[in-house]
């Protein structure tokens, strides 16, 4: 097929080349003829101008002696123009015969001009002026006849040459029309011949590409020969290779997607360039679950939107360090959609795809690890505290008991004044306070194991509230001004707990509430069942003075107290007892006044060994 096309193209090319050469020659010949015609027209125009200048000079001469006589300068100007025109003619002609005729004409023009000048010089002598005027008229008429003769001859030759040129142009035009008219037929013939051998193979290849575009990688091209047959073989081989590569890519994509989506850690791909630096372009399901946003919401956010204020301020610095080649590892805080702040470890590095830079970030929620570390640290502290408490009990308890007994005996001596006896009674009271502190320290450090039993939380709370109001602390003056608002959920399920330890916890909280209200206010007790968590939610609130943030942060720490005679162990022991029940406790400020202690207790418990 290729040879046929080459032969046809060669023949057509030769025809167009020879035809083009002929047309170029014809055009050049016609252009030369038209140049000659233009030159002859210029000559004719010059002769007409010469004749016009001669008649103008003649008119100037005849105007002398009349009231409209031209000035001498004007006449001389027209004579100069006449001479200039004849001189110009010498630049246009080169033939010897023409040149001789022009020289003769030039001589007559100069003679005529001199005669006019001489006539003007005799203007003062009327008779002499008429004689010179007649001579000038004779020379002028001869000159005009000569020029008219030359113009007539030139017009005849110009007309003949114009007819010849137009005839040649007409012949060239006809030939050009024939070539142009024949061109489409030749092209059509060639196109028909080529299309016969090209259309079917191209159509077959076009159908193959359409099937390939739709994803049909099983389609093959068959039945083609010559070069198209080789092309079909190459096309089929390409499709087979493409099918194999697509299969590998799909398998790799599935593995990547499975790894990406099933990963336990949050994985983000962030844009690393331009105004979208830090924008989330991809996120897995773990990221969705960890942060509480939908997948679509995450793709509209920047990674800084998930950081807390301190971490968000350092996003730019972290990205710059990643671009410097560092694989970054940090512990920062993220914020869930509900506002919860939680710690994460981030591991991030540069990811380049094509000519674009991205950032791959893997985030791990370390809340449980932090809690375990805090629990371990607290356990170590409790262990140390227990050892300290045991040592104090061993080193202080017995000597303190001896001191107490000695002072009690001394206080009953009859020879002591009453004032000294009162001092000894106060000393005995302080010793008892020290004994209480040691006992509470031992209870905090080594609390007794809970004795689990089915417990009605509402009943325990109601009993403790009644007992606290009937038997308040000596330092508290309820005097019938403390009101209790009970908001118990009906049909609250029983829980597995130690009722005595719960009574101790509730009593500590209610006594603290009464102390905070300083004898007047409202003690609120509320219970609810959380079916999703399978836990009882308990709230104990007061309307007393709201402590500042520093006090609320330290309120569950051992030995921390704001009371003059407090030991600072009541709330710490309460928290420890609730933790032994796998429960939690926290404190929040009320909107109007006072605070609320919020507790959570699971309905069921694990075994005692598991708790330990």
Image (spheres, rainbow, N blue to C red):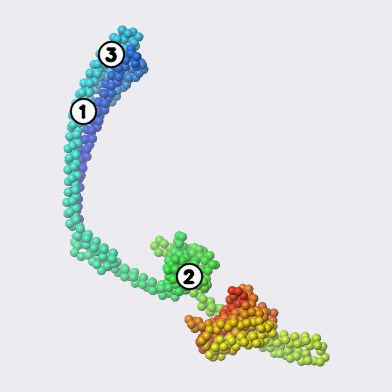
Quadrant of the rendering where the C terminus is positioned: bottom right
Which of the 4 image quarters holds residue 517?
A: bottom right
Please name the residue shown 28% across and 13% down the image: 136
Closer to the camera, 323 or 37?
37
Question: Going from the N terminus, do you reach mark 3 or mark 2 first?
Answer: 3
Residues at marks 3 and 2 touching, judged by CB atoms closer than 8 Å: no
**Residue under circle 3?**
136
Q: Earlier in the sequence, mark 1 or mark 2?
A: 1
Residue drawn 18% across and 57% down? Answer: 197
Location of the N terminus (image quadrant):
bottom left
Q: Label 1: how many residues lie within 10 Å, few (<14), some (14-19) or many (20+)?
A: some
For disc 3, the neighbor class at 10 Å (few under 14, some 14 to 19, many from 20) is many
State the image coordinates of residue 551 (x, y, percent, origin top left): 63, 75
Residue at x-position 50% and y-position 82%: 530
**Which structural element holds mark 2?**
strand
Residue 34 occupies quadrant = top left
Q: What residue did someone put label 1 on? A: 158
- Residue 256: tell me if it is visible: yes
Which residue bears the numbered disc 2? Answer: 347
Say which residue appears at 24% left-offset and 63% top-offset: 207
Residue 33: percent from left, percent from top? 22, 33
Residue 601, image x, y percentages: 54, 84
Q: Is residue 92 left or right of residue 160?
A: right
Does the rendering let one see residue 14?
no
Query: Tag on residue 526?
Result: none
Left or right: where 124 falls relative to 20: right
Residue 123 placement (x, y as % from top left): 34, 10
Between residues 588 and 436, which one lies in front from this camera angle?
A: 588
Q: Alpha carbon of mark 1 to alpha carbon of mark 3: how far?
A: 32 Å
- The span from disc 1 to disc 2 (Cα, nearest Å) is 99 Å
Q: Which element carries disc 1, helix, strand or loop?
A: helix
Figure quadrant of residue 208? bottom left
């Amino acid at each position: 097929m290729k040879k046929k096309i080459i032969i046809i193209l060669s023949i057509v090319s030769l025809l167009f080349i020879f035809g083009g050469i002929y047309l170029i020659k014809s055009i050049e010949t016609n252009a030369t003829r038209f140049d000659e015609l233009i030159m002859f027209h210029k000559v004719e125009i010059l002769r007409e101008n010469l004749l016009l200048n001669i008649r103008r000079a003649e008119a100037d001469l005849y105007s002398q002696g009349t009231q409209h006589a031209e000035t001498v300068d004007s006449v001389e100007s027209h004579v100069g123009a006449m001479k200039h025109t004849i001189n110009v003619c010498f630049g246009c002609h080169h033939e010897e015969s023409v040149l001789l005729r022009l020289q003769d004409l030039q001589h007559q023009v100069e003679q005529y001009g001199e005669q006019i000048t001489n006539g003007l010089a005799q203007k003062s002598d009327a008779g002499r002026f008429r004689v010179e005027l007649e001579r000038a008229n004779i020379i002028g008429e001869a000159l005009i006849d000569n020029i008219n003769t030359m113009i007539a001859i030139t017009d005849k030759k110009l007309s003949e040459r114009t007819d010849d040129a137009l005839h040649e142009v007409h012949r060239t035009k006809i030939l050009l029309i024939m070539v142009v008219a024949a061109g489409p037929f030749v092209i059509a013939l060639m196109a028909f011949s080529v299309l016969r051998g090209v259309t079917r193979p191209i159509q077959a290849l076009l159908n193959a590409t359409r099937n390939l575009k739709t994803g049909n990688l099983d389609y093959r091209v068959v039945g083609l020969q010559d070069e198209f047959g080789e092309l079909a073989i190459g096309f089929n081989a390409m499709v087979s290779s493409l099918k194999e590569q697509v299969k590998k890519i799909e398998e790799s994509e599935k593995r990547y997607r499975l790894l990406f989506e099933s990963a336990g850690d949050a994985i983000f791909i962030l844009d690393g360039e331009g105004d979208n630096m830090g924008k989330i372009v991809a996120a897995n399901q773990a990221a969705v679950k960890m942060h509480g946003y939908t997948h679509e919401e995450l793709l509209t956010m920047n990674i800084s939107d998930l950081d807390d204020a301190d971490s968000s301020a350092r996003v730019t610095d972290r990205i710059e360090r990643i671009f410097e080649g560092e694989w970054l590892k940090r512990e920062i805080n993220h914020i869930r959609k509900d506002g919860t702040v939680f710690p994460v470890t981030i591991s991030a590095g540069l990811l380049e795809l094509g000519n674009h830079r991205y950032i791959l970030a893997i985030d791990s929620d370390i809340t449980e690890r932090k809690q375990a570390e805090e629990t371990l640290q607290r356990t170590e502290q409790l262990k140390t505290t227990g050892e300290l408490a045991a040592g104090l009990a061993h080193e202080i308890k017995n000597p303190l008991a001896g001191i107490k007994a000695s002072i009690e005996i001394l206080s009953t001596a009859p020879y002591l004044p009453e004032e000294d006896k009162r001092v000894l009674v106060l000393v005995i009271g302080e010793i008892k306070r020290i004994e209480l502190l040691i006992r509470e320290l031992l209870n905090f450090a080594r609390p007794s194991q809970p004795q689990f039993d089915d417990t009605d939380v509402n009943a325990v709370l109601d009993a403790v509230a009644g007992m606290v109001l009937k038997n308040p602390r000596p330092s508290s003056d309820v005097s019938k001004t403390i009101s209790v608002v009970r908001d118990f959920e009906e049909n609250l399920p029983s829980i597995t707990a130690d009722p005595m330890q719960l009574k101790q916890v509730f009593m500590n909280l209610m006594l603290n509430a009464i102390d905070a209200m300083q004898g007047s206010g409202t003690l609120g007790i509320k219970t609810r069942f959380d079916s999703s968590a399978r836990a009882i939610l308990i709230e104990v609130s007061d309307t007393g003075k709201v402590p500042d943030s520093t006090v609320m942060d330290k309120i569950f720490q051992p030995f921390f107290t704001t009371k003059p005679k407090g030991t600072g162990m009541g709330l710490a022991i309460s928290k420890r007892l609730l933790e032994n029940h796998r429960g939690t406790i926290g404190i929040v400020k009320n909107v109007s006044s006072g605070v609320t202690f919020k507790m959570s207790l699971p309905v069921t418990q694990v075994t005692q060994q598991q708790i330990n």
